Image (cartoon, rainbow, N blue to C red):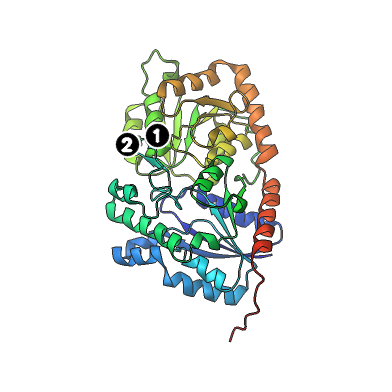
Amino acid sequence: MRILQCHNFYRFPGGEDQVFHDESWLLKNHGHEVFHYLRDNRDIDNMSRIDLAKATIWNRKTVSDLEALIHEVSPELIHFHNTFPLISTSAYHTAKRYHIPIVQTLHNYRVMCPSATLFRKGKECHSCVNSTFAIPGIIHKCYRSDRKATAVAATANAFQRAIKKSLHLVDRFIALSETSRQQFKLAGIPGSKLIVKPNFVRPDPEVGTAKGNHVVFVGRLTEEKGIDSLLEAWQAEPANPISNIPLRIVGQGPLEDKVRHIASQNQNISYLGQLKHNEVMDQISQSQVLVFPSIWPEPFGRSMIEAFATGTPVVASTAGSIPEIVQHEVNGLHFTPGNAKDLQHQVVRMFTEPDLHAKTSIGARTSYEQRYTADANHDVLMRTYVEAIESNPPKLEICFA
């Protein structure tokens, strides 16, 4: 197949960016022709607020760029990852003018929430899910704590709902978990268009053999990722067993200064910053446990399956889709979201109950082999593409003058 992948990279690299790279590799590795249309949020620095608002709602550059690419490569399908803010849903309309099937991966909740997280002030929030225009989000400055920026995001969402119902132009949506699939159904996306396809890990890192005596966190340093409860758990009294367990933190984000400050005062916390993917995998492989403390309705959580691939069990909260991935005392342990004491207790169990750690380590690798390999993922992706093509109206013959 000839597939055009479209993605807007984030300022701080994250799981979505890695998924884009992985799926590009996966398709090429299985003999498909893959073409890219890419934008980068660092370009925003050279744009005025008005120009950014216009591009977010309807990007004329996207239209002209995609038209040129369609003329050049004649893709059989276009697969969108992130379109916000510089690609915009003008891309959907461009694809449909040429009767090209569309697949959209829903990495977050952007289509129903200005902040993309369904999370506000430490709690899950659904105030804007069924609203044509996200007034509550604007009032509470949910996107970047900026009312004007939130208004632009809300306007983009309202525009795609109102102007020819942009989301209805998509032939198939990929949800990363059944939990997130149900959320998208509540927002009005037909269940028949929603396919559950989790992420995958490549290349197979195999089981790490040199497990250290430390814990690792990998992710964006944001409130919803549970950074506050993570740091609180490691600021324990000396009598608490966790005070002897080192924690390594990998990632970037708005709470980076806070992490740096606390790490400078606590000898058991090491902040490693943003690492290359192979370096991240090394850190996970060498760790006794990966901790995943999210407090938002997490759609998936890539670092958990990266840990599984290396045979590293996961201590995770029960927020969002996490219980679909981490099964208590099978491939990891659960704790109550935001509860630092419960987090401490479950981490300590992994260090004081060797049989439990051995069992969950085997369970972690088994989970990877059964659900999160590249080959298994390709099968689901191809079924999704075939459904999108078969549901799309017959392609018209177009004469390019």
Asked if one can make out residue 144 in the rendered structure from this viewpoint, the answer is no
The answer to which quarter of the image holds residue 118 is top left
Side of 153 relative to 102 (left or right):
left
Asked if one can make out residue 54 in the rendered structure from this viewpoint, the answer is yes
Q: What SS does tag 2 mark?
A: helix
From the image, state whether disc 1 or disc 2 is nearer to you.
Answer: 1
Q: Residues within 10 Å of mark 1 (few under 14, many from 20)?
A: many
Sequence-wise, which precedes: disc 1 or disc 2? 1
Query: Relative to 386, does residue 223 appear above or below in the rendering?
Result: above
Residue to which mark 1 is pinned: 227
**Coordinates of residue 358 in the picture (x, y in percent):** 64, 22
**Coordinates of residue 233 in the picture (x, y in percent):** 40, 24
Residue to which mark 2 is pinned: 258
The answer for how far apart the CA atoms under marks 1 and 2 are is: 9 Å
**Coordinates of residue 360 in the picture (x, y in percent):** 62, 25
Side of 31 relative to 4 (left or right):
right
- The amino acid sitting under disc 1 is Ile
Q: Which residue sits furthest top?
A: 239
Side of 45 relative to 185 (left or right):
left
The quadrant of the picture occupied by the N terminus is bottom right
**Coordinates of residue 149 in the picture (x, y in percent):** 31, 55
Mark linked to residue 362: none
Compare residues 200 and 156 and report the one nearer the observer.
156
Q: Are marks 1 and 2 in contact (CB under 8 Å)?
A: yes
Query: Relative to 103, does residue 401 appear above or below in the rendering?
Result: below
Compare residues 354 and 371 and report the one nearer the observer.
371
- The amino acid sitting under disc 2 is Lys
The answer to which quarter of the image holds residue 328 is top right
How many numbered circles does the render carry? 2
Q: Which residue sits furthest bottom?
A: 401
